[in-house]
Image (cartoon, rainbow, N blue to C red):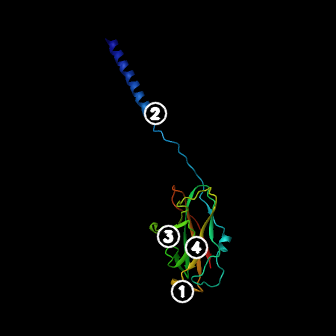
Amino acid sequence: MKKSKLLILFMVMCLSIVSIAAVTYGWFVSVKRTGSVYFKTGEVKYMMNEDSFENNFIKKSYIVPGDELITKPVYIINKSTISSNLRVMIEVEVNGVKYIVDSTNQYIIADLTDDWVFDLEKDTDCWYFNANNSQVIDHDSATKDINILKSLKLNGNTFGTSIASSKVKITLYFQGKQSNYATWEDLGKITKNL
């Protein structure tokens, strides 16, 4: 009788160990399978030749409202190694008063290329690159030059002729991000005093 109790106890203990091992194995083996996950790292980088930027604007000692301030289109070069997004804020300072170039043309009349859109709802004062209805700039696109400004004028109806001898400063602020995966970061700015 003692042997049978001992045998039953041994069998219960073995059954318990096997049950615990099976449950533990099931716990660790039940892994959710996912598809392949790819990570791509790189650098968001744009370049503007400062000498070229300097030569894109008029060289007059006076400013005439309504006259063109740009002699050649302003562009930036895409040197990114990954797909990215780009936005620019254009600020024109006249006699110490700063004006943001927006789509209303109230103070500054700007003609950006068709690839740029101004989103009034975002409240960022920025123009967003949006070629072919896509804000993503492919890093291995055929053209690395991204045209920005074709024309820039002071609105003569707003300013009048009293600013003919005014000091004018044009600043372009650039921000970029890895497309859809990050927040906007400052890439830099470039300034021209007329």
Rendered view: 184 above or below 103? above
Residue at the spot of label 4:
171
Residue at the far left in the pictured view: 1
Q: Quadrant of the N terminus?
A: top left
Q: Quadrant of the C terminus?
A: bottom right
Residue at the spot of label 2:
29
Q: Earlier in the sequence, mark 2 or mark 3?
A: 2
Distance between the alpha carbons at the discs numbered 4 and 3: 13 Å
The disc at residue 130 is: none
Q: Mark 2 touching mark 4, by CB under 8 A?
A: no
Quick one: label 2, few (<14), some, or many (20+) residues within 10 Å?
few
Q: Earlier in the sequence, mark 1 or mark 4?
A: 1
Tell me what residue is drawn at x 39 percent, y 26 percent: 19
* Residue 175 horizontal/vertical position (percent): 55, 64
Q: Is residue 90 left or right of residue 19?
A: right
* Residue 80 horizontal/vertical position (percent): 61, 58
Could you tell me the amino acid type at mark 1? Gly
Q: Earlier in the sequence, mark 4 or mark 3?
A: 3
Rendered view: 107 above or below 77? below
Residue at the spot of label 1:
160
Could you tell me the amino acid type at mark 2? Val
Residue at the spot of label 3:
125
Q: Earlier in the sequence, mark 1 or mark 2?
A: 2
Element carrying mark 3: loop
